[in-house]
Amino acid sequence: MEETAITGLAADPVTTWVWLATIAGILGLFIFDFFTHVRKPHEPTFREAGLWSIFYISLALLFGVGVWYLWDRQHGIEYFAGFITEKSLSVDNLFVFVIIMRSFAVPRAYQQKALLIGIVMALAMRGIFIALGAAAIERFAWVFYIFGLFLIFTAYKLAKESLSTVKSTEEAYEPNAIILYVQRHLPTVPDFRGNALTVIENGKRYFTPMFIVILALGMTDLLFALDSIPAIYGLTDAPYIVFAANAFALLGLLQLYFLLGGLLDLLVYLGIGLSLILAFIGGKLIIHAMEANTLPFLNGGQPIEGLPHIETPFSLTVIVGILVVTTVLSLLKSRSDARKLLGMDNKSA
């Protein structure tokens, strides 16, 4: 009897066993991460964070090679384009993670647990969004219009923020309404108790600041997922690749947090680069929606012909090109600012 298949929109079957094996493998890596890094609270050294970051990125690249050879070249390119995009957006997430950790004064030795739980929550929420997105796209082609316009609007907001102020990890964290409500109404102790989430005092259970930190990280991940899922659906229509690219982008984010640390402030143009990428993918989604148009008030409900078709290899080239240029310009800008500051200090001395 033929095995049940879960198919993406591209009609390339991914068997149930492949899905289950992939999910089990990803969960196994997170459990491995817990026992090797989080179970014993400590602050990772630069060398430790660097080696594990290389390990997880290499693992993600090897997975992509496997997709390329075991599936086909097209899906391999889609995976690499999706992974690079999601990884870049994840690096942008790290700015907020650092700000949250500093705002709550989380001891460095206990930050790994908060980050790992937050990342696992992010993967679970993205899994839900991926499933909902796949179901919506399968049934309603016009969803691509919404995804595209949303990404262009997000790109505009991100570019506006990046041009008005340089993103820095020194910014203050502004908790949303849910976090404020929890802080006001949940019985909590004022200080950290190791990396425990709850403690019992005088026969009553209290939550620790660690619980609030993890909740804040989870809420932040939820907001970032609203950008990342439409973005990757602009690069591939295969839910399996969407999930795998997101999972591998989140794996190793814990180590990347400690590796980059203070280096994040050097990436002054990262926000502009990401806004260009989101705008490009948003435009691609709208073109795709027009090619499969069914809206009755647009071209009589018929597909619009003669539009430029953007191939995935070209999308990958654009994404990598934007990231390389913005990273180089960021480092040059940071180096120039450091020289100017040093020159002013020498003059004042």
Image (spheres, grey):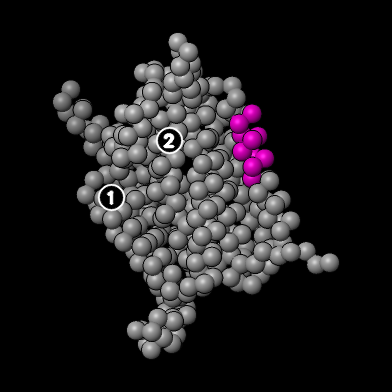
Q: Where's the N terminus, which quadrant?
A: bottom right
Q: Where's the C terminus, which quadrant?
A: top left
Residue at image position (35%, 35%) is 179
Q: Which residue is mark 2?
A: 215
Cα–Cα span, label 1 and label 2: 26 Å
Image position of 344 with respect to 153: above or below: above
Image position of 67 with respect to 182: above or below: below
Q: Is residue 109 visible?
A: no
Q: Secondary structure at mark 2?
A: helix
12 sits to left or right of 336:
right
Residue at image position (50%, 69%) is 137
Q: Mark 1 vs mark 2: which is more N-terminal?
A: 1
Q: Position of residue 249 (x, y in %)?
A: 53, 48
> Which residue ends up furthest to the front in the rendered image?
203
Image position of 27 with respect to 283: above or below: above
Name the one closer to the observer, 169 or 234: 234
> Which residue ends up furthest to the left in the rendered image?
348
Range of magenta residues: 26-35
Q: Position of residue 337 (x, y in %)?
A: 26, 39
| Dominant SS in magenta | helix
Residue at image position (21%, 28%) is 345
Q: Which mark is residue 308?
A: none
Q: Secondary structure at mark 1?
A: helix
* Viewer-side label of 1, 2: 2
Query: Dot 1 surroundings within 10 Å: few (below 14), some, or many (20 or more)?
Result: some
Q: Is residue 14 visible?
A: yes
